[in-house]
């Protein structure tokens, strides 16, 4: 919710149909230019996960800095220290703190993005050179095209277009662009929390363009993320591996105890059987149903994309979407048996209701496994440890920040965006919300099939160009925050 | 059982107390010589599992051939072909078919052993050079000292001692010494079956000295082996790994189905829950109990040696021994989860009653898992495949072949040997029994703590020297077969 504030979003620009048409047409007219610039950015192989390419990440940061300054903005390259990678101590890429507009009478939008990319090599199975942006059938193939260079550049071209047309933005814009997102955002949370009373202290709303449409045809805006509780369950029977021929049948076997405990965690339809875990899930309210019913989602496509060999346990669209986004799920990722190396992964309950806390879930899971173990009358030793947890996040999609995003989508695509959540975690979202106390919007540019992190990552030309319009229109619609 | 045969075991030697004392004293007097020769054999690092050391295996074979011939025996070096190892085609070490004594009026004993050894390197954690036989506190440390060079040499020194004392053996001896036992006995089963009508056609009984005492103080002879049924259970949910954040809760998860099925196979005390598997286990007859009660076995030592962190499920000695040797056990070795490489191991029911057949067990396990999967109403695809099976083996320990072994043990150690079985499989045993149709005896030389296959493998000097006496006495006692 936006709270009382002396300032009002002000602009001399009247964002009417004529203005938006002029803005959109201008962006269309510069399509080739925008693609050329994206190609420049993609050509800088800013892979944060490889020591050898760290300088390229820094180079990409300077490329962005130069553009922000060219547009009349200011940039601080924030040094966030060093890390040890591949055995050597290397500098962390700087975080760009950019500022465009300093009108004290205007409100301030903060946009986040990242300029580093996932590793990529043609030999991994790319059809084209990953760091050579290649247009084929209306698609721009290249590492980082969609994740997240396209969106980051989109903010800049939207600002540039407004200048070229002499349109006054209703808000000042602060930019937080990091170079470590694909490598765990090392140092980011600390920086954001540290800047809460500094660079971010006057931020009125936040927009992150770093996710995707649910599918390939309908735009969406995203208002929720599932949290995560990640556990490691250990059962010890003896101090060394035992020959099952020699000892089988005469000792308590950890693997047997383990599968018995794990078999009690969740049923075959995905219902969690751990006492108390479902109690803290917020009940579904009547109109919440409508949000899911309205979403453009096809179970058959979903099954095909997932490569399922059978059917889904919950054939209704609403059930599947709710179980994907707002109900807890529990996955068993693997078991480290006597013949395996390190790295066993165990239970992962995920859920979406903010008042359900990972620590609370841990206590409930621990209570459950210890009780199940007690039933076995086995003398193996059991321990449960929490690997990492991430709180879930849900935003109010009626907040003016979201209304602006919805209006912009309607203007650009002519349809109301689907209101979606994400199963995967984007922890920076929660960090921004907690640090600023303001509304955070996830406004995606790319499609669900862009293949971020995969081979042949792409961004459709239409999503890129319309995405620039979308981000611009969103800014111009930020008048009521 | 020995069947009617025109031939009788004949000897001009009367094996009385005086003769056995003379024989044993002679062997004692040559202790240093025997140790020196074992050191020579251990120095030949005949590791069959390493291409680079294959020539050493062949060298060891020739070392043995020379000794057998020196003792007046004849040897055929049987070529059993090639195999591909570490990417290159290499010769399989020859199988030595040795013959000592050709008296047509005598019966024939066949002895089996192997002259290859497990890999070993000081850096693996050996306190001494593994291929330098090192005597410390009455123990001979060195790779192969106990498994199986000590016993193989024991046969030769027993024969030599009988010659040196002018004692006539009651049987002809045929020797089968292989060089691939530690590498799966490639080609051995085929060879033995092929020689059933040839080299082995006139064999009247078989003795294998390639296992160990149950403990460290009391000798034993072994009359049974557990068979093995080895399964691989596969559950497929989709054609690719799925992100549990994105798909969790909306698809049937193979890991969940798998742990649920596996949790129904066996209870925490090791009782198999698969319908029908226990039905074919022969009931325990009254006097069978006595065999186990008589065995020198301490649960506390067993727990300590196994490094158990807790107690055993079956504290009684008889229960534990029976579950170890004559009842089926079921072990779950591991699970290949989404984040693992190849090699997942699944259920291993083991059992000991000859009329319980691996194929029959496979049918019952398959029926069980399919029924459990049906209960889950899951659309994952399940398949069970049998990796390999090994029939169990139990011999009649009142057969003259065993009586000879028991008499020999009493003469050398002054106690009745424990009558034991083994959990681990020694498939060659069953192969010899099936190929010859005669009694097969397992007569161990070493102790339960010799650490075959481990670091610091050793053979106690007393077991080596007494073992030579034991094998000799056994031969002289083979008068009633």
Image (tube, coloured by chain):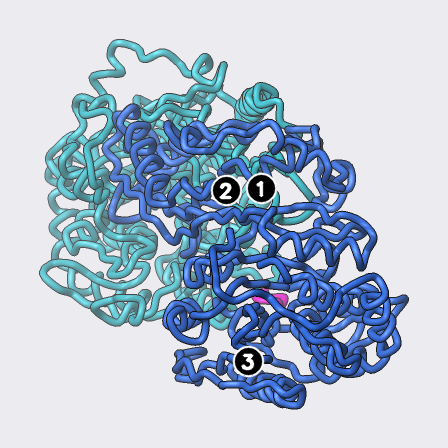
Chain colours: A blue, B cyan
Name the chain under label 2: A
A328 or A77: nearer the eye? A77
Q: What crowding class fits label 1: few (fewer than 14 Cα within 10 Å), some (14-19), or many (20 or more)?
A: many
Residue drawn at x 61%, y 43% is B247
On the same chain: label 1 and label 3? yes
Of badges 1 and 3, the one in the foreground is 3
Label 1 vs label 2: CA separation?
7 Å
| Among the 4 quarters of the image, the one containing residue B418 | top left
The answer to whether residue B25 is above or below residue B382 is below
Q: Provide residue B411's location: percent of width, then percent of height.
A: 15, 36
The percent position of residue B38, horizontal first and vertical second, equals 27, 63
Please check whether the numbered discs 2 and 3 fall on a single chain: yes
Label 2 and label 3: CA atoms lie apart by: 37 Å
Q: Which is nearer the eye, B357 or B254? A: B254
Pointers 1 and 2 in contact (C-beta within 8 Å) = yes
Residue matched to label 3? A102
Extent of the magenta region: B86-91
Query: What crowding class fits label 3: few (fewer than 14 Cα within 10 Å), some (14-19), or many (20 or more)?
Result: some
Give the residue drawn at x 39%, y 44%.
B111
Q: Earlier in the sequence, mark 1 or mark 3?
A: 3
Q: Is residue B89 magenta?
A: yes
Q: Is residue B432 above or below residue A437?
A: above
Of callouts 2 and 3, which one flags the residue occurring earlier in the amino acid sequence? Answer: 3
Q: Secondary structure at mark 3?
A: loop
Nearer-N-terminus badge (1/2): 1
Return the mark for residue A325: 1
Which residue in the structure is indicated by mark 2?
A352
The image position of residue A381, as x and y in percent, is 25, 39
């Amino acid at each position: 919710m936006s709270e009382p504030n002396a300032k009002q979003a002000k602009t001399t620009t009247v964002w009417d149909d004529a203005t938006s048409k002029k803005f959109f047409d201008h962006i269309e007219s510069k399509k080739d230019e925008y693609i050329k610039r994206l190609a420049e950015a993609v050509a800088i192989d800013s892979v944060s996960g490889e020591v050898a390419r760290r300088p390229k990440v820094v180079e990409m940061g300077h490329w962005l800095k130069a553009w922000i300054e060219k547009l009349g903005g200011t940039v601080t390259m924030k040094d966030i220290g060093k890390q040890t990678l591949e055995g050597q101590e290397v500098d962390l890429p700087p975080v760009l703190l950019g500022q465009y507009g300093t009108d004290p009478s205007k409100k301030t939008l903060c946009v986040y993005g990242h300029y580093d990319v996932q590793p990529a090599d043609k030999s991994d199975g790319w059809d084209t050179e990953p760091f050579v942006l290649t247009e084929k059938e209306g698609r721009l193939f290249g590492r980082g095209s969609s994740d997240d260079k396209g969106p980051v550049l989109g903010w800049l071209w939207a600002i540039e277009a407004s200048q070229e047309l002499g349109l006054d933005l209703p808000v000042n814009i602060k930019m937080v662009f990091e170079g470590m997102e694909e490598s765990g955002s090392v140092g980011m949370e600390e920086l954001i929390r540290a800047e809460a009373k500094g660079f971010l202290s006057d931020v009125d709303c936040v927009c992150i363009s770093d996710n995707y449409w649910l599918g390939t045809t309908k735009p969406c805006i995203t208002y929720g993320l599932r949290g995560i509780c990640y556990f490691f369950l250990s059962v010890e029977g003896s101090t060394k591996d035992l020959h099952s021929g020699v000892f089988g049948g005469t000792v308590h076997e950890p693997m047997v105890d383990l599968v018995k405990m794990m078999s009690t965690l969740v049923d075959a339809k995905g219902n969690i059987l751990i006492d108390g875990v479902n109690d803290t899930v917020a009940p579904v309210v009547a109109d919440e149903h409508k949000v899911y019913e309205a979403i453009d989602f096809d179970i058959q496509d979903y099954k095909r994309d997932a490569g399922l060999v059978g059917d889904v346990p919950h054939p209704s669209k609403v059930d599947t979407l709710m179980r994907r986004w707002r109900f807890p799920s529990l996955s068993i990722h693997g078991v480290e048996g006597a013949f395996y190396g390190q790295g066993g992964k165990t239970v992962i309950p995920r859920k979406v209701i903010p008042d359900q806390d990972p620590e609370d879930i841990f206590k409930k899971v621990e209570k459950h496994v210890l009780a199940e173990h007690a039933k076995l009358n086995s003398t193996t030793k059991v321990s449960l440890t929490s690997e990492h947890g991430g709180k879930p996040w849900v935003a109010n999609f009626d907040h003016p920040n979201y209304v602006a995003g919805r209006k912009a989508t309607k203007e650009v695509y002519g349809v109301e965006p689907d209101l979606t959540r994400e199963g995967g975690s984007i922890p920076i979202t929660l960090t921004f919300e907690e640090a600023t106390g303001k509304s955070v919007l996830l406004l995606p540019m790319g499609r669900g099939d862009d293949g971020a992190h995969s081979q042949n990552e792409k961004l459709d030309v239409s999503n890129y160009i319309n995405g620039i319009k979308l981000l611009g229109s969103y800014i111009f619609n930020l008048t009521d925050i």
